[in-house]
Amino acid sequence: MQRRDLIRAASVAGAVGLAKPATVSAQENAALPSENRFSIDTARVRTTARTTAGPVRGYRQGGVTMFKGVPYGAPTGGANRFRPPRPPQPWTEVRSCLNYGPIAPQDKGTGRFHDEEAFIFRWNDAVEDEDCLRLNVWTQSLDEERRPVLVWLHGGGFAAGSGHDIPAFDGANLAATGETVVVTLNHRLNLLGFLDLSEWGEEYAESANLGMLDIVAALRWVRDNIAGFGGDPSRVTIFGQSGGGAKVNALMAMPEAKGLYHRAMVMSGSFAMFNSPEKARGLSALVLEDLGIGRGDLPSLQALPYARLRTAAERVMARINPSFDGFVDVRRIRDMLNFAPKLDGKTLLADPRHPGHVASDPQVPLIIGSTLNEFVTGINNPAAFAMTDEELRRRVERFVPGKAETAIAAFRAPGPEDKPFALWSRMATAPIRQAVIDQARRRLQAGSAPTWLFWFTWQSPVLEGRPMAFHCLDIPFWFGNAQTCASMTGGGWDALVLSASMVRSLLAFAADGMPEAKDLPTWRAVSGDDLASLQLADRPVMVREVDAAERAAIG
């Protein structure tokens, strides 16, 4: 191994938490980082960077300099509520950016009330405020190295979440490799970011897409400022999971975002749907009616406490959407009314060949993927694997009426010994995997830049293995946080090894648009006759559409 390769491998291994074997050579020891990862340096002379709005001070720890809660836009409350993002008010004194800033007002859901779920995710709760246009930066050095930039977009649909929502989003381990600068961010959510007031006049034409325009403003901040943090504004990769993946797809359909990023990655976000103009106007009209706000009365709408706005929206959506009785059918999402970006044909463009989907910038290389078990797991359900064959048949009959036996046979074929709950999990979440394949096919039809597929099937060992390959499990692997997030991954050696390989692949993609890693099989881009995926398991392999017959059985 060349010395350069050894140093790079050691830096990635150290960043993702791979402990060195007991017998480490002197050469390997020389390649290990010497900086104490626990000591903190807050000296302004070493931790201050300049931005277009003014100087900011962060702190340094473990070979990484971090800036948290940096404003990229003005507060969005009061007179700025329901208006496009504006630049922050400039400052002259050094601004302290040591702690995460406020997050967008939101309903965080009920996960925190479930012990197992809260144990796994370990949410970083924060203060909510409409002064939420903040971002966070992790970099190895404030030098002129011009490292590729990874900009992370958080999940939570378009309703909840933040750039530091869970420990898995921490960018320190990726930045510690010295091969990237990591940025995460907050933006407006739910009705604050996606209430359609377009019928009030031309000045409100973009109101249903304000949350996405916030992200565009953050990408402009990256373009204008990231060089001062050791980053390269000409090599920006946007990546996100779930709702964050949907935001990546939305950005690829926004003319205002073009040129602000150069590669993209969508994780478990291909299935998300966007609002038609009719849906957006209809939902907003019902909420305004519930609030008693007349057309054009923006001052009254701006003056209402957020709690009143949220309560009205919740009442409306509870009334018009199907009730949830615990039966998971992700296909129902398409029929529900929720706050989401609007395909208005101007700010957000539809795919001309597939009008119900967003356009996809054909010049941008894209990675797309999903996990095996997504939302249907044994988290919070210790009896999950006690499901009987008869219970499986009843669920499948409800899922695909009249096709239960055929569907069960198709999903049982590749794993005859699989427990009924494992079959049900794969079946119930197959539409999410189908959306990934469909998105890749649309890209092929459009003659787009290379598209790569992944399928994360690695199974978490925590809680007797009941979480399986759950929705969000791949995040700590891509971030090099498999050890940091041991409550998700178990923190074992196999998880750390897989994470190290995935990190190397992501760093290569960010650097030159090719997701290559010498310890992974050659990751083929999809082609007309080959929609193969990199299956990320204990031993990553390239697989063709091995699940095509299963998906066809429920189609």
Image: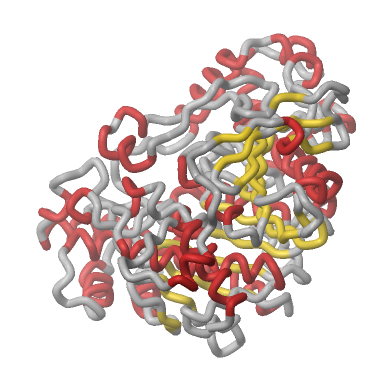
Q: Residue at x 41, y 71 (%)?
A: 536
> At which x and y percent is residue 34?
53, 54
Q: Going by the image, does 125 lie left or right of 308? A: left
Q: Would residue 18 appear left or right of 293 to someone viewing this image?
A: left
Percent of width and height locating residue 489: 33, 54
Is 526 placed left or right of 268 in the picture? right
**Relative to 77, is 242 above or below?**
below
* Left or right placement of residue 394 versus residue 456 in this view: left
Q: How is the image coloured?
A: secondary structure
Instruction: Please provide percent x and percent y for residue 50.
Output: 83, 37
Across the whole image, how many numbered discs are drawn on residues?
A: 0
Indicate the quadrant containing the C terminus: top left, top right, bottom left or bottom right: bottom left
Identity of the residue furthest to the bottom in this view: 529
Seen from this angle, which residue lies furthest front?
26
Tell which of 214 and 443 is nearer to you.
214
Q: Residue at x 52, y 37 (%)?
A: 39
The answer to whether any part of residue 258 appears in the image is: no
Kindly indicate the quadrant of the structure image that contains residue 360.
bottom right
Look at 26% across and 33% down and name the residue there.
115
Front-most of residues 161 and 417:
161
Give above or below for 48 relative to 268. above
Residue at point 44% right, 69% down? Answer: 455
Quarter of the figure with residue 80 = top right
Q: Is residue 391 above or below residue 533?
A: above
